[in-house]
Amino acid sequence: MLLYPNLTQLDLTGPFEVFGRFPELDLHLVWKSREPVADCRGLTILPDTDFEHCPQADILFVPGGPGQLALMEDAEVLAFLRRQAAGARHVTSVCTGSLVLAAAGLLSGKRATCHWLSLEQLRLFGAEPVAERVVIDGDVVTGAGVTSGIDFALTLAARIFGEERARHAQLFMEYDPAPPFPGGSPASSAPALVEAVRVETAAFQTRREAVARRVAAELRGAPLPAEKV
Amino acid sequence: MLLYPNLTQLDLTGPFEVFGRFPELDLHLVWKSREPVADCRGLTILPDTDFEHCPQADILFVPGGPGQLALMEDAEVLAFLRRQAAGARHVTSVCTGSLVLAAAGLLSGKRATCHWLSLEQLRLFGAEPVAERVVIDGDVVTGAGVTSGIDFALTLAARIFGEERARHAQLFMEYDPAPPFPGGSPASSAPALVEAVRVETAAFQTRREAVARRVAAELRGAPLPAEKV
């Protein structure tokens, strides 16, 4: 499980809670060093290993969050992900973590999902964006925004360990969700609210898309977009 | 937000993710010292303050987890909670965190909830156990097991900041949950699975109840149970 500065911590802590209930899984939180890593709202988590010492993962997992932008052009991170993905049985992400996988060239031709605000950016990398909460395409399993990490991890756990054991974990976690009001996705929220969130995040999303376009162009070996020349 | 060894991290990280989206809230993770604290599955989080330096909380929050047992008889923790509760607008918990609030004498006569396996233990402290996902009784707001922390925090945020803003946070977190299979509560799970979990946890739950009985008896000023004398 990749840990990095300015991630959205629930993207990672949700799946950690699920995976942690399967003793066959030996969980590792990995970053460049073992120094504490602060999420985008100040929750600080300690990595337990670094890129050099991290064992080969069976499940490679990348969470999302605003720190994803810096990762998209971080050669050390992308090389680590490519190296791990080559030996992993499952290449996975939650939220905008899928854009980092895409930047590492790991989603080309794959169906995948992402946080709803950034879903279309997957297309820049030759991936097929799918507006579902969990998307499975062979060994690639991706979850949508933030809280979908719990659904993602239960889905993956059921594939690996069987549905009965996943239901067992679900009952321990008392995961019979009951949001106090409907909403939570563009389809289930009032159009005015969806539009308000789009407007509010427009500047950041423009920046995120510019990074994605630049990285995708470099991946394709195409000439750089004019604004960078 | 109380952080302590052997907590169940999602009890805390779920609500942190919700509360973190309200800039009016200045979140603190507090423990006896600022040394790293490992959850019961090894996720290690840094407190940002300690009991001595923690400001008065508007929302006092206690997560659950196996470490709750030690807290129940930790005079320093209980004194801190009582002191904070006296000045807090909302006294809150998720999962077995409510048993810690109860041990501090803060739930007497209150309707409250807890992880389903431990719900009945609230009765020992003169609280009324309620098998609902989120229970509000005046200034006391409690959530059921682990994942209910997200529903709990959205419910509380809606009370404080209004439903529109809570829906806004919900949409950002893409919280339109879709578990891959039904279940997750004793009522929605197969009776055989519920029974299996009860059997599997019986030894630990017996120990948890013994602690609760002892603490409750001491709180009432009653003679100690025979086994302790």
Image (cartoon, coloured by chain):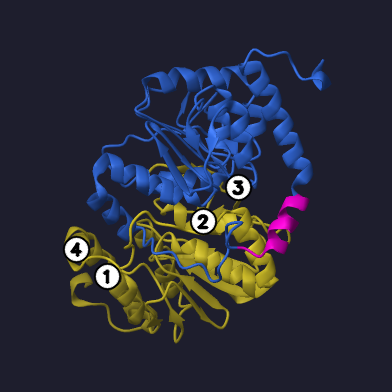
Chain colours: A blue, B yellow
The quadrant of the image that shows the N terminus of chain B is bottom right
Examine the image and state in which quarter residue A66 appears. Answer: top right
Discs 2/4, front: 2
- Find residue B2 and report its horizontal and vertical position in percent: 52, 58
Mark 2 to mark 3: distance in Å? 20 Å
Task: Tell me the kind of residue under disc 2.
Answer: Gly
Examine the image and state in which quarter residue A20 appears. Answer: top left
Of the numbered discs 4 and 1, the one sitting upstream in the chain is 4
Of the numbered discs 2 and 4, the one sitting upstream in the chain is 2
Callout 4 environment at 10 Å: few (<14), some (14 to 19), or many (20+)?
few
Q: Nearer the viewer, residue A180 or B195?
A: A180
Q: According to the image, label 3 marks what residue? A: A116
Q: Chain under label 3?
A: A
Discs 2/1, front: 2
Q: Chain under label 1?
A: B
Give the SS element for disc 3: loop
Task: Tell me the kind of residue under disc 3.
Answer: Trp
State yes or no: discs 3 and 4 in contact (Cβ < 8 Å).
no
Q: According to the image, label 2 marks what residue? A: B14
Left or right of residue B17, residue B103 in this image: left
Q: Mark on residue B209?
A: 1
State yes or no: discs 4 and 1 in contact (Cβ < 8 Å).
no
Give the SS element for disc 1: helix
Q: According to the image, label 4 marks what residue? A: B202
**Image height of B213 relative to A192, above or below:** below
Which residue shows up at 33% across the image and 57% down it?
B181
- Find residue A4 and report its horizontal and vertical position in percent: 57, 33
Task: Tell me the kind of residue under disc 1.
Answer: Glu
User: What range is drawn magenta here?
Assistant: A189-200
Of the numbered discs 2 and 1, the one sitting upstream in the chain is 2
